[in-house]
Amino acid sequence: MPVDNLHGVVSAKERTIASASAFFVPAAAPEDQERVYAGLAQWCHRAVPQTEARIYSITYVHDGEEWTATVGESLRGVRRKKSRARGARVERVVHLTDPATVLAIFPDVPYLVVTNHRIAGSVRSAWENPFMAGQPQSVTYFSVAR
């Protein structure tokens, strides 16, 4: 697997650029985006990534479930259960959600995901904040104006 110089091991196929999403921090005023993002990075004990290295979305596996964390969206996942029914193999897909909204994702191993859990009022989540997402299966970066 090729090495992504910015973030560890990620194949070229898995390193994608989000073409429709310019960098943003949910609920932060436009003039405060950089300050809020820097504050979140500091809270996570991470350096502020360069503009082209800021992460929009990751897909990772936790306890056999495949989860997606996308900035500005709630966490969502899939649990696949395999069984037999009348001698045939059957796969049942269970869709999972978590009400926390992703505020930022920071690279390194492990990747860290920051949500609004325990930050914004009474938002509940099954995940700690921030939480470790390990080494993602895929990484999507914010688009960069050129």
Image (cartoon, rainbow, N blue to C red):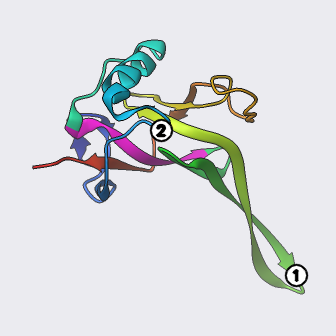
User: Rounded to the nearest whole Å, what is the CA distance between mark 1 and mark 2?
Assistant: 45 Å
Asked whether 19 or 28 is in front, the reply is: 28
Circle 2 residues within 10 Å: few <14, some 14–19, many ≥20: some
Label 2: element kind: loop
Residue drawn at 55 percent across, 29 percent down: 132
Label 1: element kind: strand
Q: Circle 1 is placed at which residue position? A: 85
Q: Is 107 drawn above or below residue 66 in the view shown?
A: above
Q: Give the main secondary structure of the magenta stretch.
A: strand
Residue drawn at 31 percent across, 25 percent down: 34
Asked whether 83 or 44 is in front, the reply is: 44
Q: Which mark is residue 26?
A: 2
Residue 104 horizontal side relative to residue 38, left or right: right
Quick check: can you spot residue 63?
no
Amino acid, disc 1: Ala
What percent of the width, then of the height, locates residue 43? 48, 14
Residue drawn at 44 percent across, 32 percent down: 28
Question: Magenta segment range?
Answer: 52-61
> Quadrant of the rendered structure where residue 7 is?
top left
Residue drawn at 55 percent across, 49 percent down: 73
> Quadrant of the rendered structure where residue 48 is?
top left
Q: Is 37 drawn above or below residue 78 in the view shown?
A: above
Quick check: can you spot residue 60?
yes
Amino acid, disc 2: Pro
What percent of the width, then of the height, locates residue 113? 51, 32
